[in-house]
Image (tube, rainbow, N blue to C red):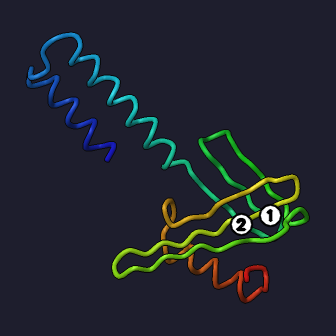
Amino acid sequence: MVTGVLAAVIYSFWSGKLQGEFAQAAAIVAALATIVWGGYYATLRVEINESGITCRRWLFVRNFYSWENFIHADLEEMDQGEVASCTIFFHFKGGEKCTVSSRFFLLDEVRELRDEMRAAGTLG
């Protein structure tokens, strides 16, 4: 998506189809917004290991949730023909929450996590 928007902006400038300062400014804003949006999704990571869950949003923004503070996890699934989703909501002491969803990660990987949690008895 980012590549497509950037290619369209570059082509529009190169071909001379963008006329007027407003159109050029709008194209630059669209390109910058696309880079920020794409950068967020490119750096989004969730690492789950024996000590807890580390959620990374952007390069330097990390949240760590320790299993010592884990209360419970809820599951929300939908499967309607060709549209399916799976979301796991982790709840921790102090009201902290972490979400792992197929909106951001591969559906099969979220379902694999669901199955592992069910086998471990941490997901109802």
Q: Position of residue 114 (x, y in %)?
A: 64, 79
Q: Residue furthest top?
A: 21
Q: Quadrant of residue 46?
A: bottom right
What residue appears at the point 78 percent right and 63 percent down from the top-left corner? 91
Q: CA distance from mark 1 to mark 2?
A: 6 Å
What residue appears at the point 61 percent right and 41 percent down from the top-left corner? 59
* Front residue (pair 48, 104): 104
Left or right: where does residue 41 sit relative to residue 21? Answer: right
Residue that mark 2 sits on: 48
* Front residue (pair 96, 27): 96
Q: Position of residue 55 (x, y in %)?
A: 68, 54
Asked if the residues shown at circle 1 and circle 2 are in contact, with their CB atoms under 8 angstroms apart, the answer is yes
Give the amino acid at mark 2. Ile
Left or right: where does residue 102 sit relative to residue 23? Answer: right
Q: Is residue 75 above or below residue 4?
A: below
Q: How many marks?
A: 2
Under tag 1, what secondary structure? strand
Residue that mark 1 sits on: 52
What residue appears at the point 61 percent right and 64 percent down from the top-left corner? 100
Q: Position of residue 12 (x, y in %)?
A: 15, 27
Q: Is residue 22 above or below residue 41?
A: above
